[in-house]
Image: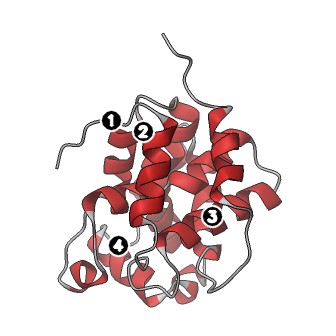
Amino acid sequence: MRLAPLTHLDALETLLLKGGHDLYSGEAVSQLEHALQAAAAAEQAGSGAALITAALLHDVGHLASRQQASDLAAGIDDHHEALAVQLLHDLFDHDVLQPIALHVAAKRYLASTEPGYLGNLSPASTCSLALQGGPMSEEEAARFCLRPNAAQAIALRRFDELAKVPNLPTPPLSHYLAIAATVMKACP
């Protein structure tokens, strides 16, 4: 699936508001709740604007693909991390895009290197991990660690795992879009 990049923050807001009320792939929260909770976790951890923005937008590819929980059950991986990078390429630089691009790999990395990580994944995350290639081999994990932004991707992954709490209060979308505006690419 090839997507046209978004060129305005307003278009991103519309996408988040329009599709964000759908449930997030088998979880008990909506796509928008998940995005806001991930951004809030990043902000509470003292992350910079780029990582907070990446946390907010890391799963925007699911909205563009219109993935449903039944797609996961049917064994369909929408490659949402790549779709998100396609969508956001014209709006943000690599400091936002690379953690998003690598957050699935970060899950595979943590599944292979951190004892107990697999046992703490939600059923939906466990299912998607299998579709995404499962835990990394030792060689893959060693290569992942050498990637620029690997540490940010791991942090993003941890924020992602925290962002599945029904009815958790968060700041509104406008708060995080204001933060995102501070790390947008400069207009030509």
- Please state which amino acid type lies under the numbered disc 1: Pro
- Please state which amino acid type lies under the numbered disc 4: Gly
Assess disc 1: are there few (<14), some (14-19) or many (≥20) residues with their C-alpha within 10 Å of its C-alpha: some
Q: Which residue is mark 1?
A: 5
In this picture, residue 92 sits left or right of residue 140: right
N-term-proximal mark, 2 vs 1 = 1
**Count of picture labels:** 4
N-term-proximal mark, 3 vs 2 = 3
Identify the residue at horizontal 58%, vertical 67% (top origin).
Answer: 160
Q: Which residue is mark 2?
A: 88
Q: Are marks 2 and 4 in contact (CB under 8 Å)?
A: no
Q: Secondary structure at mark 3?
A: helix
N-term-proximal mark, 4 vs 3 = 3
Q: Secondary structure at mark 2?
A: helix
Identify the residue at horizontal 39%, vertical 85% (top origin).
Answer: 26
Q: Mark 4 or mark 3, which is nearer to you?
A: 3
In this picture, residue 36 sits left or right of residue 138: right
In this picture, residue 16 sits left or right of residue 69: right
Q: CA distance from mark 4 to mark 1?
A: 29 Å
Q: Are marks 3 and 1 in contact (CB under 8 Å)?
A: no
- Please state which amino acid type lies under the numbered disc 2: Leu
Nearest the viewer among 52 and 13 is: 13
Label disc, if present, on residue 134 of the rendered structure:
4
| Quarter where residue 137 is shown | bottom left
- Please state which amino acid type lies under the numbered disc 3: Leu
Q: Are marks 2 and 1 in contact (CB under 8 Å)?
A: yes
Assess disc 4: are there few (<14), some (14-19) or many (≥20) residues with their C-alpha within 10 Å of its C-alpha: some
Label disc, if present, on residue 36 of the rendered structure:
3
Assess disc 3: are there few (<14), some (14-19) or many (≥20) residues with their C-alpha within 10 Å of its C-alpha: many
Q: Secondary structure at mark 4?
A: loop
The image position of residue 119, as x and y in percent, is 54, 89
